[in-house]
Image (tube, rainbow, N blue to C red):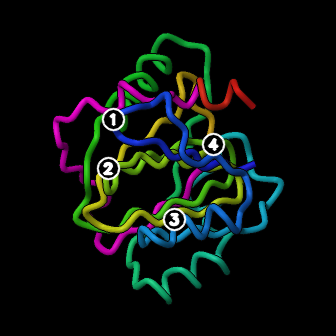
Amino acid sequence: MTLLTVWPDTDASTVLVRTEDAEEIQGELKQLGVRFDRWPVVTGLPAEPTSEEVLAAYSTYVERVNSSEGYTYVDALHMTPIDTPEWTAKAAEARTKFLAEHTHDDDEDRFFARGAGVFYLHVNGKVYGILCEAGDLLSVPANTTHWFDMGTRPDYVAIRFFHDDEGWIGNFTGNTLANDFPSFDELTADR
């Protein structure tokens, strides 16, 4: 189940909001201009699906988002654990990159077709941790300071939406705030 946790950005030990209620999550995030939606999860995707397989399975929903938000480039990616040193190194490198606080000049829309990840939004003196799971769509507005944690053993399939063909480009802030807040592994261990 999706989880929203809100902390003051100065104290990760003080929880201001913690909820799994989808309507409450939607209401909290709407105040930030963040769109949160839920789609039915399509079963039967392969363990390591191609982008085309994922996009075909969710084509109706993808077309609706593209139409309403004006996206021109959409892809899907997966992180599927493989017990090899190469995969472990690749996963650790990707995780480190996304854990660094950053912004984007474009909106960041992600739909989780499988697995989970946590988006942390740093807005108005607070940190909003949104644990997204299969079926969740989260749209982070352009220029919103945030970071993403996929955990130490990432296992997810996500659809990504872009307004241009350049894809994911992060503008890193240099802030190490992400180190002070509970990680994906810590948030999911509590559940």
The mark lying in front, picked from 4 and 3, is: 3
Q: Earlier in the sequence, mark 2 or mark 4?
A: 4
Quarter of the view holding residue 135: bottom right
Q: What residue would you read off at disc 1?
A: 10
Q: Are marks 4 and 1 in contact (CB under 8 Å)?
A: no
Q: Which residue is mark 4?
A: 116
Against 4, residue 86 (above or below) is above
> Which residue is identified by label 3?
29
Q: Callout 2: 10 Å neighbours few (<14), some, many (20+)?
A: few
Q: Quadrant of residue 28?
A: bottom right
In the image, residue 113 lies at what x, y percent? 67, 55
Circle 4: is it few (<14), some (14-19), or many (20+) Cα within 10 Å? Answer: many
Which element type, helix, strand or loop, lies under badge 3? helix
Question: Horizontal placement of 136 versus 67: left or right?
Answer: right
- In the image, 40 versus 1, the foreground residue is 1
CB under 8 Å between discs 1 and 2: yes
In this view, the mark in front (3 or 1):
1
Query: Residue at 47% across / 66% down in the picture?
Result: 139
Which residue corresponds to mark 2?
Answer: 125
| Lower sequence index among marks 1 and 2 | 1
Q: For the residue labelled by badge 4, is the local secondary structure a helix, a strand or a loop?
A: strand
